[in-house]
Image: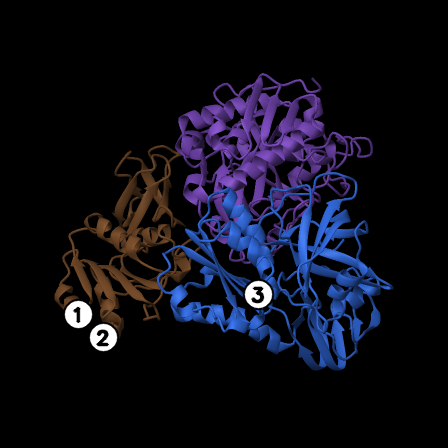
Amino acid sequence: MSKFTFPESIKSRPVYGTLAPRDGSAHLLVADAHGAEAILDMATPEMMAKAHIIYIPKGEAFEEDLRALNPASFYSGPSYGAAEPRLRKALQDAKMGLQVYLAGTEGLMGQAQNEAMAAGIPHTAIQTEHRGSVARRMQCVHCKGITEDVETDPFVCSHCGLNLFVRDHYSRRLAAYQGVRVDAEDPGNVPAPKGIYE
Amino acid sequence: MSGAEKIAVTVTDIVPLNDLVTRFEFKSTDGSLLPTFSGGAHTVVEMQDGDITRLNPYSLMSDPMDQTAYTISVRRDDEGRGGSLFMHSKVSVGDQMVISYPVNLFSLDLRAKKHLFIAGGIGITPFLAQIKQLERFNGHWELHYACRSESLGSYVDELTSHHPNETHVYYDDQDQVIDLANLLDGQPLGTHIYVCGPKGMIEWVRGTAAGEGWPREAVHYEEFLAPQPGKPFEVKLAVSNKVIEVGEQESLLEAMEREGVDAPYLCRGGACGQCETNVIDYAGNFIHRDHWLDDAEHANGQKIMPCVSRFEGKVLVLDR
Amino acid sequence: MSIQFNDETFRDDYSFYNSERAIKRFPFPFHEDSYMYSVNMEQHRGGPADSVYEKRFDVDEHYVAEMRDRAMVLADDPLRCQSLPHMTLAGWDLLELIMVSKSEDYPDLFELHRDGNNWRWINKPLGIDDSFVFLDETTLPYGPMEYITRQAQGDFCVLDQRDDNLWMDAGMVTTQADWSLDFDIGMNFFEWHAPVPLAHEKGIFVRALKFLLNIQQGAPARRLNWTMTVNPLLDTSPENYHKWGIQKTTLTPENIGAKQHLRVELQTFFRLPRSNALVFPIRCYLCSFQDIMTVPKWGRRLHRVVRDLPVELATYKGFIDNRPMMLDYLKNFDDGLETSAGIWPDLDTEPPLQT
């Protein structure tokens, strides 16, 4: 399943759109897994002539299709962490007028958005489109550790081991949702985990 | 009570700069220090012109850190309703006046990695304070300033002598034009544009920046609209239960104030939104001149900004 | 000194207490017998003598103990005080506002001596006498916001104003009603209020934001907000919720009068001149149910408010499970008589509890 309609939620929860080419001096596109499909749906030869694509396949087979778009620069790497230095360099060298497009999982988009914001682009000017996994990047509010790819509620913090429930409250600066101990008022009473959107 | 807090001041210096622009210095009448402010702030100056009280906003151009005096520069507008003419012809050193606390609708975005100032004519004034603020904190800035001619280039000498590398001046009468497309192309990420000048210049800068892919949030502008004269019209104020006449030379807001109706305001220049008023009924045409309401709101006849907008027609009933 | 400072704690043995004077000046937050959100803003320009509204920044008998508690929270978790890089100027604005206000409003406790940018600050209750250079961070032991808010009761959110919104870009937050500065820093007005139920739908935040964006220099505003806390615990943070949450289950019909506290926030709003930022101090006052019950009007009213509060709000404020026990206690102080309008205790005019 590549597209998912998120239920309506609170005001801090990000809302994703559909990528569309915009006027600009250059285009930076960052995607993981099925996010490639959003780029493929939007790309034009004119845009690709000024485009830099950073892609993290996560086992999906879109790399050749993306290369075939003929972007000015293309990178495929094993993880977001591996891609990050390259992303930072691209933003460091960029000028006003750069357009940023993010597609794929929430964790990928959130982290890349954070880098672009730190470089001076307002978050409202950064385009995003969700594709693929609906897993969340979660921060444990108690120990501050980040647990990646959380699919169930509650879940176990991968750092401190507390059982946390999944809030919709989202921090752009942390690129994460908030996890809070589920059994604080009744220790040991941890509900059975189920899918976040079940 | 409407508007910002008031300060009683004395005019301590008047310096004509050129044929059009005169600088005024104010000090607190009771000798106390004036409030500090942030670059880009304005003050509303009250002018007692016979029976008429005029309230005009002027950008503060002095050093925001200097609490001993404020300075403003007033460009004489011979076509206008008389506020600037009053300042030029009827105000003398030693006069006591009332001004408002500083209000800032054009503040710096202190996150900016670079501040790019674009000024047209008297639009230079807010930048003079912003430059002093940024200089104090080692801010990164650059100014592009278009004036009609060398003789009308207010503060050009001061700017070019203190900041020769940051200041770029363009004279219309020498066919010098800001090469805007080139200027905007190649600015580092995190640059913010600030433009203050005539309406056409603001639209030119905003349009060019948008076309080059600049985010809306990185383009700041300020245009004070002086209320324009127009045909007299009649307004019914439903809450106050009054029918008032707006004269040719006064704004709707001024007419309400003249009749003792306490109407909210801050900038009196169509920018801050404070005086937004609901329309209860109308038959006729609005002459909307503000920057606050959007196009849809200008079209649907439900709201009016009485500081700058007028009306032509048979019936206008306001929720005030 | 005019104020006798309590030797008390807000943790462990919870020796916190309110003197009779403190109870009378407690900012009881309900002006009528029911509660719903509203944009209940008013000008912050003084108030009745000795009320919490009288001074710009109220200093009371808990000052020294609260500052000691704050220092402990910060030693455990320095992330409770953060300031994004562009907010340093606003920090100096805040330092100036607090130093000037406190030295003018409490000259026997605080002194500020200024010679140009060379400033000397004396804080007698905390035994501080520091000389520093205004606007020079290297001359203070902390950043300007942290320095002064280690000496001022209540939390402080410093909000940047841009793009017709307010942004939570700096703060000192150690006495919060269960929200995390570390998580919320950088959010805009709607985002950091996102978890609040009902108010968005009622348009409360749209109207409140419009009001706040227009707060001008020299014209501060204020409002009251409230919640419930078991034990006089100032640091009800999400960070430590896994430790304090369990305390909510320790209420019994015997101890509820002493343990259950009404927690009131006096929120004020000041425009900061040099930065054009807005500071939003959130001053927390705690009062046990049994102390509130010494004011007959407040006893009657608190019962009615807690009884009639919508379930969503009782849940959000974290006392839905304890509400039945609260009502069992509070109903003993509600004789059904009418109450006078407004928040003041009206001890001289309201009748004692009829039994």
Residue projecting furthest to the right: B51
Q: How packed is label 1: few (under 14 Cα within 10 Å), some, or many (20 or more)?
A: some
Q: Nearer the viewer, mark 3 or mark 2?
A: 3
Q: Amino acid at mark 2?
A: Pro
- Which residue is tagged 3? B150
- Which residue is tagged 2? A45
Q: Amino acid at mark 1?
A: Asn
Measured Cα–Cα span from mark 3 to mark 2: 49 Å
Rendered position, C211 above or below B81? above
Report which colour depicts chain B. Answer: blue
Look at 20% across and 66% down and name the residue there: A72
- Which residue is tagged 1? A70
Q: Secondary structure at mark 3?
A: helix
Measured Cα–Cα span from mark 1 to mark 3: 52 Å
Q: Which chain wears brown?
A: A
Measured Cα–Cα span from mark 1 to mark 2: 8 Å
Let me know if marks 1 and 3 both belong to one chain: no
Front-lying residue, B2 or A168: B2
Q: Amino acid at mark 3?
A: Glu
Rendered position, C281 above or below B60? above
- Left or right, C264 with respect to C138, comes to right
Which chain hosts label 1? A
